[in-house]
Image: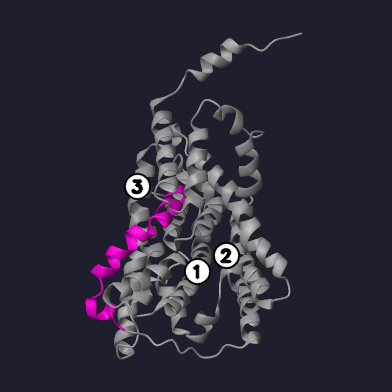
Amino acid sequence: MGGIDWSGLLGGALTITWQQVVMVAVGGLLMYLAIAKEYEPTLLLPIGFGCLLGNLPVAAYVLGEDGLFGVLKRAGLDTELFPLLIFLGVGAMMDMRPLLSQPVFVLMGALGHLGIFGTLVAAVLLGFNLAEATSIGVIGAIDGPTVIYVGAKLEHLFETPGLAAAVAVTAYSYMSLVPIIQPPLMRLFTTRRERAIRMEYTPRPVSKTAVILFPIVVTVLAGVFLPQAAPLVATLMLGNLMQESGVVDGLSRTAKEAITNTATLFLGLVVGSMMQGAAFLNWGTAKVLLLGLLAFALDTVGGILFGKLVCLLSGRRINPLVGAAAISAFPMSGRLAQQIAWEEDDQNFILMHALGANTAGQVASVIAAGVLMALLSPLFR
């Protein structure tokens, strides 16, 4: 019987570059943040573990076309399946009533994504091609599945090594750091008096018919006017329709729990495995990290500034902190807005308003990405 040449395997196992050592440490750091600090563990734990495994000598056996991560990438990332499944679950978790009862939040959601377009311009100025700059700009959606979806659509046009992984990891890493990034900006761009503004929660009643029709109408409009974003919008709205219809509770629970958790796990592992030292450690990645931070900051500041404008026009009846929640870090930013409001007045309850803006931001992020791709796709080379 033939034997295995263990000497060759051992020799390969002892060969490791400094880049791999660095990335193994990065993977360890991500897992530490997930476990010890509980920073978005659902995201950072699988990403960190995938990064660890992707930079060990065993990577040769799991990253190939027939390896574990190779199969998962081909089946779930290249086909955009994982982001779509996650959006199905996100839609099932959302309550559209605060948004539908206070339509001003629609504008807040639309204007709370200044980071997408500002970061795209900055990326072009830093030397990225238009497809790369578009993918980087979508980090400003503050929505991991949307970033992955757009990146998968444009990856064949990327010229910077390791860019797809850098964009995905930047988006998810900064999402986990939203509780650190947003509060200082909320305090800096609002006054104590503004943060203390109370908002009485007396929403207009929303009929069940309106709640059910909303996801159907949005899906139809996206299918007609934004075909590039239609799959994301459709899965988000389908999840919401299942939740609000009240006739498929089992499917709704499955979407929110089993499907979302499974897709997030596999997506995190694949994204982490793409963080291979040789391709990941370059100036392009460093610039993406800086641009990602810019995108998050611009989104928050843009939302707050629009919130201040609405506050002024409403006769100081709108707390500007609600504008900071008009991003798609759902429901994290809504809770943060409430937390900062409580620092000034522990009897000030703006959570439902903030969640309404947060819901608008979730929907607007997908639409903004679709608009961006529709406008720029003729220019991609």
Name the residue nearer the viewer: 27 or 288.
Answer: 27
Write the start and end of the magenta stretch as one range. 168-197
Dot placed on the residue nearer the N-terminal end, 1 or 2: 2
Residue at far top of view: 1
Q: Gap between marks 1 and 3, in whole Å?
A: 26 Å
Given the image, on which type of amino acid does mark 2 rest? Val
Alpha-carbon neighbours of circle 3 within 10 Å: few (<14), some, or many (≥20)?
A: some
Q: Gap between marks 3 and 2, in whole Å?
A: 30 Å
Foreground mark, 3 or 2, reads: 2
Q: Secondary structure at mark 3?
A: helix
Task: Kindly tell me whether residue 273 is visible in this rendering.
Answer: yes
Q: Is residue 381 left or right of residue 198?
A: right
Residue 82 at what x, y percent from top left? 61, 53
The label on residue 90 is 2
Name which residue lies at 42% across and 52% down.
Answer: 39
Name which residue lies at 35% across and 44% down.
Answer: 286
**Mark 3, residue position:** 287
Foreground mark, 1 or 3, reads: 1
Q: Secondary structure at mark 2?
A: helix
Instruction: Give the position of the N terminus as an image quadrant.
Output: top right
Alpha-carbon neighbours of circle 2 within 10 Å: few (<14), some, or many (≥20)?
A: many
Name which residue lies at 23% across and 76% down.
Answer: 191
Residue 92 at what x, y percent from top left? 61, 68
Proximity of marks 1 and 2: CB atoms separated by less than 8 Å: yes
